[in-house]
Image: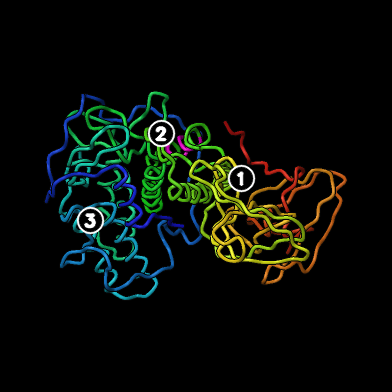
Amino acid sequence: MRIRLSLRAWVAAVLALGLTGTPVTGAAAATALPGRSATLIAYARDGYLPRLLPGSVSPTSRQVTVPRTDPLAHDASGVRLFTWQGALYDHPVVQADWGLDNLNAYQVTGDRFFLDRAIAQARRNLDRKVESRGAWWYSYPFDLPRCTGLVLQAPWYSAMAQGELLSLFVRLHEVTGDATWRTAADRTFLSLTLGPQLGVPWVSWTDTDGYLWLEEYPDSPGVRGERVLNGMIYAFYGVYDYWRITRDSRAVSLMDGTATTVRRYVPATLRVPQWASRYSVGCARSYPSYHQVHTQQMLALHQLTHAGVFAAYADVLRADYPYPPIDGIVWFGPGSHVAYQFDAAGRVVAQKSINLIRFSTATADQRVRVTGRGVHYRMANGVFAGMFVAEDAQHRWLAGKFVEHTYAPTRLLTVEPGTYTGYAYDSRWQVVGSKTVTFPRASGAFLRASAWVNGRLSYQVTAGTYLGYWLPAAPGLVLGDAPPLA
Protein backbone atom coordinates (compact mmCIF):
# COMPACT_ATOMS: atom_id res chain seq x y z
CA MET A 1 0.00 0.00 0.00
CA ARG A 2 2.84 2.39 0.74
CA ILE A 3 3.15 4.76 -2.23
CA ARG A 4 6.05 7.18 -2.20
CA LEU A 5 7.91 9.44 -4.53
CA SER A 6 11.52 8.44 -4.97
CA LEU A 7 14.08 10.65 -3.23
CA ARG A 8 15.20 11.92 -6.62
CA ALA A 9 11.62 12.93 -7.47
CA TRP A 10 11.31 14.72 -4.12
CA VAL A 11 14.55 16.57 -4.82
CA ALA A 12 13.29 17.53 -8.28
CA ALA A 13 10.18 19.07 -6.73
CA VAL A 14 12.32 20.95 -4.21
CA LEU A 15 14.61 22.19 -6.98
CA ALA A 16 11.61 23.84 -8.60
CA LEU A 17 11.19 25.88 -5.44
CA GLY A 18 14.88 26.73 -4.91
CA LEU A 19 15.92 25.13 -1.59
CA THR A 20 18.57 27.07 0.29
CA GLY A 21 20.21 26.65 3.66
CA THR A 22 23.28 25.86 5.65
CA PRO A 23 24.16 22.60 7.40
CA VAL A 24 22.97 22.30 10.99
CA THR A 25 23.84 19.49 13.39
CA GLY A 26 22.01 18.50 16.56
CA ALA A 27 18.76 19.84 17.96
CA ALA A 28 18.00 23.55 18.04
CA ALA A 29 15.53 25.79 19.84
CA ALA A 30 12.01 26.06 18.47
CA THR A 31 10.89 29.04 16.41
CA ALA A 32 8.70 31.50 18.30
CA LEU A 33 5.02 31.74 17.34
CA PRO A 34 2.18 34.05 18.27
CA GLY A 35 0.37 32.99 21.45
CA ARG A 36 -2.25 30.27 20.88
CA SER A 37 -3.87 27.52 22.86
CA ALA A 38 -1.93 24.33 23.60
CA THR A 39 -4.92 22.26 22.50
CA LEU A 40 -6.33 21.99 19.00
CA ILE A 41 -9.39 24.08 18.24
CA ALA A 42 -12.46 21.89 17.66
CA TYR A 43 -12.49 20.56 14.10
CA ALA A 44 -15.02 19.03 11.71
CA ARG A 45 -15.61 15.29 11.95
CA ASP A 46 -17.82 13.23 9.65
CA GLY A 47 -17.58 10.10 11.80
CA TYR A 48 -15.03 8.04 9.88
CA LEU A 49 -13.68 5.10 11.88
CA PRO A 50 -10.41 3.21 11.31
CA ARG A 51 -10.58 -0.40 10.15
CA LEU A 52 -7.90 -3.02 10.61
CA LEU A 53 -6.13 -4.27 7.52
CA PRO A 54 -5.94 -8.05 7.00
CA GLY A 55 -3.46 -9.38 9.52
CA SER A 56 -3.60 -6.07 11.41
CA VAL A 57 -0.60 -4.89 9.41
CA SER A 58 0.67 -1.36 8.92
CA PRO A 59 -0.26 0.68 5.83
CA THR A 60 3.51 1.19 5.45
CA SER A 61 4.13 -2.56 5.07
CA ARG A 62 5.32 -3.87 1.71
CA GLN A 63 6.70 -7.22 0.60
CA VAL A 64 9.90 -5.73 -0.83
CA THR A 65 13.62 -5.76 -0.20
CA VAL A 66 16.30 -3.08 -0.61
CA PRO A 67 20.00 -3.25 -1.58
CA ARG A 68 22.47 -3.98 1.23
CA THR A 69 24.64 -1.19 -0.18
CA ASP A 70 22.74 2.10 0.01
CA PRO A 71 23.07 3.78 -3.42
CA LEU A 72 22.40 7.24 -1.93
CA ALA A 73 24.33 9.42 0.51
CA HIS A 74 24.78 7.95 4.00
CA ASP A 75 27.21 8.12 6.88
CA ALA A 76 29.41 5.48 8.50
CA SER A 77 26.50 4.35 10.69
CA GLY A 78 24.37 3.60 7.64
CA VAL A 79 22.09 6.57 8.28
CA ARG A 80 20.79 8.04 5.06
CA LEU A 81 21.56 11.74 4.48
CA PHE A 82 20.20 14.40 2.20
CA THR A 83 22.66 16.14 -0.13
CA TRP A 84 22.25 19.76 -1.10
CA GLN A 85 24.83 22.12 -2.62
CA GLY A 86 27.70 19.91 -1.54
CA ALA A 87 26.55 19.63 2.10
CA LEU A 88 24.93 16.71 3.93
CA TYR A 89 21.83 17.12 6.07
CA ASP A 90 19.74 14.99 8.34
CA HIS A 91 16.27 14.74 6.83
CA PRO A 92 13.64 13.11 9.07
CA VAL A 93 11.31 11.99 6.27
CA VAL A 94 14.15 10.56 4.18
CA GLN A 95 15.45 8.69 7.23
CA ALA A 96 12.00 7.49 8.30
CA ASP A 97 11.27 6.29 4.79
CA TRP A 98 14.59 4.46 4.55
CA GLY A 99 14.01 2.98 7.99
CA LEU A 100 10.61 1.63 6.95
CA ASP A 101 12.08 0.23 3.71
CA ASN A 102 14.73 -1.62 5.70
CA LEU A 103 12.21 -2.86 8.23
CA ASN A 104 10.12 -4.24 5.38
CA ALA A 105 13.25 -5.92 3.98
CA TYR A 106 13.97 -7.48 7.38
CA GLN A 107 10.46 -8.87 7.65
CA VAL A 108 10.74 -10.36 4.15
CA THR A 109 14.26 -11.81 4.49
CA GLY A 110 14.87 -12.24 8.22
CA ASP A 111 18.32 -10.68 7.69
CA ARG A 112 19.31 -8.82 10.88
CA PHE A 113 21.39 -6.39 8.80
CA PHE A 114 18.23 -4.65 7.60
CA LEU A 115 16.75 -4.42 11.09
CA ASP A 116 19.95 -2.85 12.41
CA ARG A 117 19.92 -0.29 9.60
CA ALA A 118 16.26 0.53 10.31
CA ILE A 119 17.14 1.05 13.98
CA ALA A 120 20.03 3.33 13.00
CA GLN A 121 17.60 5.65 11.17
CA ALA A 122 15.30 5.75 14.20
CA ARG A 123 18.12 6.34 16.71
CA ARG A 124 19.49 9.24 14.70
CA ASN A 125 16.17 11.01 15.07
CA LEU A 126 15.92 10.25 18.77
CA ASP A 127 19.41 11.69 19.20
CA ARG A 128 18.28 14.88 17.44
CA LYS A 129 14.86 15.21 19.04
CA VAL A 130 13.54 18.39 20.61
CA GLU A 131 11.40 17.93 23.73
CA SER A 132 8.52 20.35 24.13
CA ARG A 133 5.18 20.12 25.98
CA GLY A 134 5.90 16.48 26.79
CA ALA A 135 6.20 15.58 23.11
CA TRP A 136 9.20 14.74 20.93
CA TRP A 137 9.84 16.65 17.71
CA TYR A 138 12.25 16.08 14.81
CA SER A 139 13.57 19.13 13.01
CA TYR A 140 14.76 19.98 9.51
CA PRO A 141 18.17 21.69 9.61
CA PHE A 142 17.89 23.66 6.37
CA ASP A 143 15.81 26.59 5.13
CA LEU A 144 13.06 25.76 2.64
CA PRO A 145 11.36 28.40 0.46
CA ARG A 146 7.84 27.56 -0.66
CA CYS A 147 5.88 28.77 -3.68
CA THR A 148 3.60 30.65 -1.27
CA GLY A 149 6.49 33.08 -0.65
CA LEU A 150 7.09 31.71 2.83
CA VAL A 151 10.60 30.58 3.75
CA LEU A 152 10.61 27.89 6.42
CA GLN A 153 13.64 28.72 8.51
CA ALA A 154 15.66 26.02 10.22
CA PRO A 155 14.83 24.42 12.51
CA TRP A 156 11.33 23.71 11.27
CA TYR A 157 8.98 20.82 11.91
CA SER A 158 6.53 18.82 9.83
CA ALA A 159 3.57 16.55 10.53
CA MET A 160 4.76 14.32 7.69
CA ALA A 161 8.05 13.74 9.52
CA GLN A 162 6.27 13.23 12.86
CA GLY A 163 3.86 10.75 11.29
CA GLU A 164 6.40 8.73 9.33
CA LEU A 165 8.70 8.44 12.32
CA LEU A 166 5.69 7.44 14.42
CA SER A 167 5.10 4.53 12.02
CA LEU A 168 8.76 3.54 12.27
CA PHE A 169 8.74 3.63 16.10
CA VAL A 170 5.49 1.63 16.32
CA ARG A 171 6.74 -1.05 13.97
CA LEU A 172 10.15 -1.29 15.66
CA HIS A 173 8.36 -1.82 18.96
CA GLU A 174 6.26 -4.58 17.38
CA VAL A 175 9.30 -6.30 15.90
CA THR A 176 11.77 -5.94 18.77
CA GLY A 177 9.62 -5.59 21.90
CA ASP A 178 12.00 -2.83 23.03
CA ALA A 179 10.18 -0.35 25.29
CA THR A 180 12.38 2.45 23.89
CA TRP A 181 10.35 2.45 20.72
CA ARG A 182 6.99 2.39 22.53
CA THR A 183 8.07 5.45 24.54
CA ALA A 184 9.19 7.16 21.33
CA ALA A 185 5.84 6.36 19.74
CA ASP A 186 3.89 7.74 22.71
CA ARG A 187 5.85 11.00 22.76
CA THR A 188 5.74 11.42 18.99
CA PHE A 189 2.02 10.78 18.78
CA LEU A 190 1.47 13.44 21.44
CA SER A 191 3.04 16.02 19.12
CA LEU A 192 0.23 15.54 16.60
CA THR A 193 -2.46 16.23 19.22
CA LEU A 194 -1.10 19.64 20.24
CA GLY A 195 -2.14 22.95 18.74
CA PRO A 196 0.05 25.98 18.00
CA GLN A 197 1.50 27.75 21.04
CA LEU A 198 3.95 30.59 21.65
CA GLY A 199 7.63 29.74 21.20
CA VAL A 200 7.36 25.99 20.66
CA PRO A 201 7.13 23.50 17.76
CA TRP A 202 3.71 22.68 16.28
CA VAL A 203 2.43 20.76 13.27
CA SER A 204 -1.35 20.45 13.74
CA TRP A 205 -3.92 23.21 13.34
CA THR A 206 -7.55 23.96 12.51
CA ASP A 207 -8.20 26.28 9.57
CA THR A 208 -10.72 29.13 9.54
CA ASP A 209 -13.38 26.83 8.07
CA GLY A 210 -12.99 24.41 10.97
CA TYR A 211 -10.99 21.65 9.25
CA LEU A 212 -8.04 19.84 10.79
CA TRP A 213 -4.66 19.84 9.07
CA LEU A 214 -1.67 17.69 9.98
CA GLU A 215 0.61 20.21 8.36
CA GLU A 216 3.67 19.29 6.29
CA TYR A 217 4.78 22.94 6.09
CA PRO A 218 3.66 24.98 9.13
CA ASP A 219 3.97 28.74 8.86
CA SER A 220 6.15 29.54 11.85
CA PRO A 221 5.49 33.33 11.89
CA GLY A 222 1.74 32.65 12.06
CA VAL A 223 -0.80 29.93 12.71
CA ARG A 224 -1.48 28.62 9.26
CA GLY A 225 0.12 26.30 6.76
CA GLU A 226 0.30 25.36 3.11
CA ARG A 227 -2.26 22.55 3.58
CA VAL A 228 -0.45 19.80 1.70
CA LEU A 229 -2.54 16.74 0.81
CA ASN A 230 0.05 13.98 0.49
CA GLY A 231 2.00 14.98 3.61
CA MET A 232 -1.14 14.99 5.74
CA ILE A 233 -2.13 11.49 4.59
CA TYR A 234 1.35 10.12 5.35
CA ALA A 235 0.91 11.58 8.84
CA PHE A 236 -2.49 9.84 8.96
CA TYR A 237 -0.72 6.51 8.38
CA GLY A 238 1.43 7.14 11.45
CA VAL A 239 -1.63 7.93 13.58
CA TYR A 240 -3.27 4.77 12.24
CA ASP A 241 -0.25 2.71 13.24
CA TYR A 242 -0.39 4.15 16.74
CA TRP A 243 -4.09 3.32 16.95
CA ARG A 244 -3.36 -0.29 15.90
CA ILE A 245 -1.31 -0.92 19.03
CA THR A 246 -3.14 1.35 21.50
CA ARG A 247 -6.77 1.84 20.38
CA ASP A 248 -6.28 5.40 21.66
CA SER A 249 -9.46 7.49 21.20
CA ARG A 250 -7.33 10.57 20.43
CA ALA A 251 -5.98 8.75 17.39
CA VAL A 252 -9.54 7.98 16.24
CA SER A 253 -10.38 11.69 16.52
CA LEU A 254 -7.32 12.74 14.51
CA MET A 255 -8.00 10.20 11.77
CA ASP A 256 -11.66 11.20 11.57
CA GLY A 257 -10.71 14.87 11.35
CA THR A 258 -8.07 14.24 8.72
CA ALA A 259 -10.36 12.08 6.58
CA THR A 260 -13.08 14.72 6.86
CA THR A 261 -10.65 17.38 5.62
CA VAL A 262 -9.74 15.17 2.65
CA ARG A 263 -13.43 14.61 1.89
CA ARG A 264 -13.98 18.38 1.92
CA TYR A 265 -10.92 19.64 0.03
CA VAL A 266 -10.18 17.03 -2.66
CA PRO A 267 -13.26 17.62 -4.86
CA ALA A 268 -13.71 21.32 -4.20
CA THR A 269 -10.17 22.68 -4.09
CA LEU A 270 -7.43 20.17 -4.88
CA ARG A 271 -8.96 18.39 -7.84
CA VAL A 272 -8.39 19.90 -11.30
CA PRO A 273 -10.96 18.40 -13.68
CA GLN A 274 -9.32 16.81 -16.72
CA TRP A 275 -5.84 17.45 -15.34
CA ALA A 276 -3.39 16.58 -12.54
CA SER A 277 -4.48 17.58 -9.03
CA ARG A 278 -3.01 20.50 -7.08
CA TYR A 279 -0.15 19.82 -4.69
CA SER A 280 -1.68 21.83 -1.84
CA VAL A 281 -4.22 24.52 -1.05
CA GLY A 282 -1.50 27.16 -0.67
CA CYS A 283 0.60 26.02 -3.63
CA ALA A 284 -1.93 25.38 -6.36
CA ARG A 285 0.52 23.96 -8.90
CA SER A 286 -0.21 20.59 -10.47
CA TYR A 287 2.49 17.92 -10.33
CA PRO A 288 1.68 14.75 -12.33
CA SER A 289 3.98 12.67 -10.09
CA TYR A 290 2.12 13.78 -6.96
CA HIS A 291 -1.21 13.24 -8.72
CA GLN A 292 -0.37 9.52 -8.84
CA VAL A 293 0.47 9.63 -5.12
CA HIS A 294 -2.87 11.34 -4.38
CA THR A 295 -4.75 8.73 -6.40
CA GLN A 296 -3.19 5.82 -4.54
CA GLN A 297 -3.67 7.56 -1.19
CA MET A 298 -7.41 7.80 -1.87
CA LEU A 299 -7.49 4.02 -2.36
CA ALA A 300 -5.56 3.62 0.89
CA LEU A 301 -8.05 5.79 2.80
CA HIS A 302 -10.85 3.65 1.40
CA GLN A 303 -9.11 0.56 2.72
CA LEU A 304 -8.34 2.11 6.12
CA THR A 305 -11.83 3.59 6.71
CA HIS A 306 -14.13 1.49 4.46
CA ALA A 307 -15.63 4.79 3.27
CA GLY A 308 -16.53 4.44 -0.41
CA VAL A 309 -16.19 8.17 -1.02
CA PHE A 310 -12.39 7.81 -1.09
CA ALA A 311 -12.46 5.00 -3.67
CA ALA A 312 -14.73 7.23 -5.73
CA TYR A 313 -12.22 10.09 -5.47
CA ALA A 314 -9.45 7.71 -6.58
CA ASP A 315 -11.46 6.82 -9.67
CA VAL A 316 -12.16 10.45 -10.47
CA LEU A 317 -8.49 11.38 -10.16
CA ARG A 318 -7.49 8.42 -12.34
CA ALA A 319 -9.91 9.57 -15.06
CA ASP A 320 -8.72 13.19 -14.77
CA TYR A 321 -5.07 12.35 -15.35
CA PRO A 322 -4.08 8.69 -15.87
CA TYR A 323 -0.62 7.50 -14.89
CA PRO A 324 1.24 8.00 -18.22
CA PRO A 325 3.98 5.31 -18.44
CA ILE A 326 2.88 2.14 -20.21
CA ASP A 327 4.38 -0.58 -22.38
CA GLY A 328 1.68 -1.97 -24.59
CA ILE A 329 0.32 -2.72 -28.01
CA VAL A 330 -2.20 -0.43 -29.72
CA TRP A 331 -4.60 -2.01 -32.17
CA PHE A 332 -5.66 0.09 -35.16
CA GLY A 333 -8.87 -0.94 -36.93
CA PRO A 334 -9.50 -0.60 -40.67
CA GLY A 335 -10.11 2.98 -41.72
CA SER A 336 -8.54 6.42 -41.31
CA HIS A 337 -6.24 7.33 -38.37
CA VAL A 338 -4.59 10.65 -37.55
CA ALA A 339 -1.59 11.21 -35.26
CA TYR A 340 -0.50 14.55 -33.84
CA GLN A 341 2.35 16.39 -32.21
CA PHE A 342 1.36 19.01 -29.62
CA ASP A 343 3.04 21.90 -27.91
CA ALA A 344 2.87 22.41 -24.12
CA ALA A 345 -0.49 24.18 -24.44
CA GLY A 346 -2.03 21.31 -26.40
CA ARG A 347 -1.92 23.06 -29.77
CA VAL A 348 -1.33 20.89 -32.83
CA VAL A 349 2.09 21.56 -34.36
CA ALA A 350 2.22 18.60 -36.75
CA GLN A 351 -0.01 15.77 -37.90
CA LYS A 352 0.06 12.68 -40.09
CA SER A 353 -2.75 10.45 -41.36
CA ILE A 354 -2.96 6.92 -42.75
CA ASN A 355 -5.75 4.73 -44.11
CA LEU A 356 -5.72 1.03 -43.22
CA ILE A 357 -7.50 -1.73 -45.08
CA ARG A 358 -6.94 -4.27 -42.26
CA PHE A 359 -6.07 -4.35 -38.57
CA SER A 360 -2.57 -3.24 -37.62
CA THR A 361 -0.59 -2.86 -34.38
CA ALA A 362 2.19 -0.69 -32.96
CA THR A 363 3.80 -0.15 -29.57
CA ALA A 364 2.91 2.75 -27.24
CA ASP A 365 4.98 4.00 -24.29
CA GLN A 366 2.54 6.54 -22.80
CA ARG A 367 -1.17 6.85 -22.18
CA VAL A 368 -1.52 10.51 -21.28
CA ARG A 369 -4.04 13.32 -21.19
CA VAL A 370 -3.21 16.12 -23.61
CA THR A 371 -4.29 19.58 -22.50
CA GLY A 372 -7.83 20.17 -23.73
CA ARG A 373 -7.79 17.12 -26.04
CA GLY A 374 -8.50 13.99 -24.03
CA VAL A 375 -6.45 10.83 -23.53
CA HIS A 376 -3.88 9.91 -26.16
CA TYR A 377 -1.33 7.17 -26.76
CA ARG A 378 2.25 8.15 -27.58
CA MET A 379 3.46 5.74 -30.20
CA ALA A 380 6.94 4.28 -29.85
CA ASN A 381 7.34 2.71 -33.29
CA GLY A 382 5.74 2.43 -36.70
CA VAL A 383 4.64 5.24 -38.98
CA PHE A 384 3.38 7.29 -36.02
CA ALA A 385 6.52 6.92 -33.86
CA GLY A 386 6.90 9.89 -31.51
CA MET A 387 3.36 11.14 -32.23
CA PHE A 388 0.06 10.90 -30.34
CA VAL A 389 -3.17 9.19 -31.34
CA ALA A 390 -6.47 9.63 -29.52
CA GLU A 391 -7.87 6.73 -27.49
CA ASP A 392 -11.02 5.40 -29.16
CA ALA A 393 -12.29 1.99 -28.08
CA GLN A 394 -14.10 1.50 -31.40
CA HIS A 395 -11.20 2.32 -33.73
CA ARG A 396 -7.89 2.19 -31.81
CA TRP A 397 -7.25 0.84 -28.37
CA LEU A 398 -4.50 -0.18 -26.00
CA ALA A 399 -4.68 -3.95 -25.67
CA GLY A 400 -4.74 -5.22 -22.10
CA LYS A 401 -5.57 -4.02 -18.60
CA PHE A 402 -4.18 -0.69 -17.39
CA VAL A 403 -4.50 1.70 -14.41
CA GLU A 404 -6.31 -0.94 -12.38
CA HIS A 405 -7.88 -0.02 -9.04
CA THR A 406 -8.60 -2.87 -6.64
CA TYR A 407 -11.16 -2.26 -3.91
CA ALA A 408 -10.94 -3.61 -0.39
CA PRO A 409 -13.65 -3.68 0.76
CA THR A 410 -15.64 -4.30 -2.39
CA ARG A 411 -17.97 -1.61 -3.73
CA LEU A 412 -21.60 -1.95 -4.78
CA LEU A 413 -22.44 -1.44 -8.45
CA THR A 414 -26.12 -0.76 -9.13
CA VAL A 415 -27.33 -2.26 -12.41
CA GLU A 416 -30.37 -0.35 -13.67
CA PRO A 417 -32.95 -2.04 -15.94
CA GLY A 418 -31.44 -2.69 -19.36
CA THR A 419 -29.20 -5.00 -21.37
CA TYR A 420 -25.47 -5.31 -20.66
CA THR A 421 -22.66 -7.43 -22.11
CA GLY A 422 -19.62 -8.63 -20.18
CA TYR A 423 -16.44 -9.99 -21.75
CA ALA A 424 -13.95 -12.71 -20.82
CA TYR A 425 -10.33 -12.40 -21.93
CA ASP A 426 -7.34 -14.69 -22.32
CA SER A 427 -3.83 -13.92 -21.05
CA ARG A 428 -3.21 -11.69 -24.11
CA TRP A 429 -6.47 -9.82 -23.49
CA GLN A 430 -8.15 -11.20 -26.57
CA VAL A 431 -11.91 -11.73 -26.14
CA VAL A 432 -12.64 -15.43 -25.60
CA GLY A 433 -16.24 -15.15 -24.46
CA SER A 434 -19.12 -12.82 -23.75
CA LYS A 435 -22.34 -12.83 -21.77
CA THR A 436 -25.33 -10.61 -22.48
CA VAL A 437 -28.05 -10.28 -19.87
CA THR A 438 -31.22 -8.19 -19.79
CA PHE A 439 -32.27 -6.94 -16.35
CA PRO A 440 -36.03 -6.20 -16.07
CA ARG A 441 -35.48 -4.48 -12.72
CA ALA A 442 -32.61 -2.89 -10.83
CA SER A 443 -30.02 -5.25 -9.44
CA GLY A 444 -26.63 -5.01 -7.78
CA ALA A 445 -23.15 -6.49 -7.99
CA PHE A 446 -20.07 -6.16 -5.82
CA LEU A 447 -16.92 -4.83 -7.48
CA ARG A 448 -13.43 -6.11 -6.77
CA ALA A 449 -11.68 -3.90 -9.31
CA SER A 450 -11.98 -1.48 -12.20
CA ALA A 451 -9.52 -0.77 -15.01
CA TRP A 452 -9.22 0.37 -18.58
CA VAL A 453 -9.50 -2.88 -20.56
CA ASN A 454 -8.88 -2.66 -24.28
CA GLY A 455 -9.50 1.07 -24.21
CA ARG A 456 -12.71 1.00 -22.15
CA LEU A 457 -13.37 1.57 -18.46
CA SER A 458 -14.55 -1.82 -17.20
CA TYR A 459 -15.67 -3.36 -13.91
CA GLN A 460 -14.76 -6.74 -12.43
CA VAL A 461 -17.49 -8.19 -10.23
CA THR A 462 -16.91 -10.76 -7.49
CA ALA A 463 -19.97 -13.03 -7.85
CA GLY A 464 -23.20 -13.59 -9.71
CA THR A 465 -24.12 -13.34 -13.36
CA TYR A 466 -20.92 -11.68 -14.52
CA LEU A 467 -18.41 -13.62 -12.41
CA GLY A 468 -15.31 -14.12 -14.57
CA TYR A 469 -16.27 -11.27 -16.92
CA TRP A 470 -15.29 -7.63 -17.24
CA LEU A 471 -18.32 -5.37 -17.63
CA PRO A 472 -17.71 -2.19 -19.70
CA ALA A 473 -18.97 1.00 -18.06
CA ALA A 474 -22.34 2.13 -19.35
CA PRO A 475 -24.91 4.80 -18.36
CA GLY A 476 -27.04 2.25 -16.46
CA LEU A 477 -24.17 1.03 -14.29
CA VAL A 478 -23.96 3.28 -11.24
CA LEU A 479 -21.59 3.20 -8.27
CA GLY A 480 -23.71 4.05 -5.27
CA ASP A 481 -20.83 5.51 -3.27
CA ALA A 482 -19.86 8.01 -5.98
CA PRO A 483 -20.37 11.49 -4.43
CA PRO A 484 -21.35 14.66 -6.25
CA LEU A 485 -18.27 16.64 -7.30
CA ALA A 486 -17.80 20.41 -7.26
Across and down, in percent, residue 151 comes to 23, 35
Across and down, in percent, residue 460 comes to 68, 57
**Residue placed most toward the observer, 43 or 231:** 231
Mark 1: few/some/many CA within 10 Å (<14, 14-19, 20+): some
Q: What residue is shown at x 83% (from left), y 43% (from top)?
A: 417
Q: Which amino acid does label 3 sit on?
A: Phe
> How far apart are the two marked residues, 1 and 3, measured between alpha carbons?
39 Å
Q: Of helix, strand and loop, which one carries label 2?
A: loop
Quadrant for the C terminus, please.
top right
Q: Earlier in the sequence, mark 2 or mark 1?
A: 2
Residue 288 is left or right of residue 13, and the answer is right
Q: Which residues make up the magenta segment?
A: 258-263
Asked if one can make out residue 164 in the rendered structure from this viewpoint, the answer is yes
> Do the numbered discs 2 and 1 sit on residues whose CB atoms are within 8 Å?
no
Q: How many labels does the image show?
A: 3
Numbered mark located on residue 374 in the image = 1
Q: What residue is shown at x 23% (from left), y 56% (from top)?
A: 82
Q: Which of marks 2 and 3 is nearer the N terminus?
A: 3
Numbered mark located on residue 82 in the image = 3
Residue 478 is left or right of residue 133, and the answer is right
- On screen, residue 375 above or below 463: above
Residue under label 2: 281
Q: Which of marks 1 and 3 is nearer the N terminus?
A: 3
**Residue placed most toward the observer, 354 or 281:** 354
Q: Which amino acid does label 1 sit on?
A: Gly
